[in-house]
Image (cartoon, coloured by chain):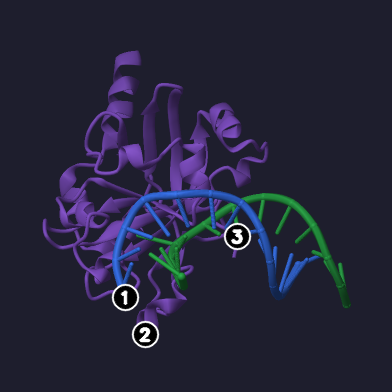
Chain colours: A purple, B blue, C green
Amino acid sequence: MIVVSRLIRLTSCVKLPRSFYEQSTVDVAKQLLGKFLVHRHAQGTLIGRIVETEAYLGPHDLACHAAKGRTTRTEVMFGAAGHAYVYFIYGFYNMLNLVTEAKDFPAAVLVRALEPVRGIKQMKRNRDTELVSNLASGPGKLCQAFAIDRALNGQDVCGQILYLEDRGEPTPKFDATPRIGVDYAGKWKDRPLRFAVRNCKFVSKR
DNA sequence: CAAGAGATCATCT
DNA sequence: GATGATCTCTTGA
């Protein structure tokens, strides 16, 4: 019986393969809800359930960094799917994105919020705060909680250090809204490309 | 509570 | 030299 339950656990706990990230960016962004981000860190293993994402659709999407062209900064987005695009912004925060679609097509999903699952003690230290719903409820917060910085830019997220897991949970009910903080993006700013789990207290505050 | 400012730096003009 | 896929704290009603 022990062996059987282990098998069940193994089969329902699968690392997302590269083919997952090669799908359309909107599909990846939606399907990431309810998946688990795992960071195997020297401090210990940190795990969170994804509850909020945003899709950045490519060079024509004025909110996407790649709309400004292929540069040192955006190079990772032009690479193969299933890699981390981590950038530094506002002088303080890192943002975690997962590169999607075909090589040479620059698109990605911004991971905006997580429900802390494992390593909560370490996350509290990293964030210097006690409230669990304030540990990873925003793109800057979650990078701080999960010790994600630009050292992880370009990391293969189909590897052993940083990856995503499907634990058998169906995609939760979610709402689609415009993306946050992209008022400069002209007609693209109102497109409903932000996806957040409905009635979830771990999404970013808005 | 809502609104505003400040923090601070890599990247691009 | 300006700005940004943010967050926190302070202010004032």
Q: Is the residue at mark 1 from the same chain as the one at mark 2?
A: yes
Tag shown at residue A116: none
- Front residue of this view, candidates B7 and B3: B7
User: Pointer 1 and pointer 2: residues touching (CB < 8 Å)?
Assistant: yes
Tag shown at residue A187: 2
Residue at the spot of label 1: A62
- Front residue of this view, candidates A179 and A174: A179
Q: Is residue A130 above or below residue A55?
A: above
Residue at the spot of label 3: A205
Tell which subunit mark 1 falls on: A
Residue furthest toward the left? A103
Which sits earlier in the primary sequence, circle 3 or circle 2?
2
Residue at 48 percent of width and 68 percent of height: A180
Q: Is residue A2 above or below residue A107?
A: above
Instruction: Give the Cα distance between marks 3 and 1.
Output: 24 Å
Disc 1 marks which amino acid?
Leu
Disc 2 marks which amino acid?
Lys
Q: Is the residue at mark 3 from the same chain as the one at mark 1?
A: yes
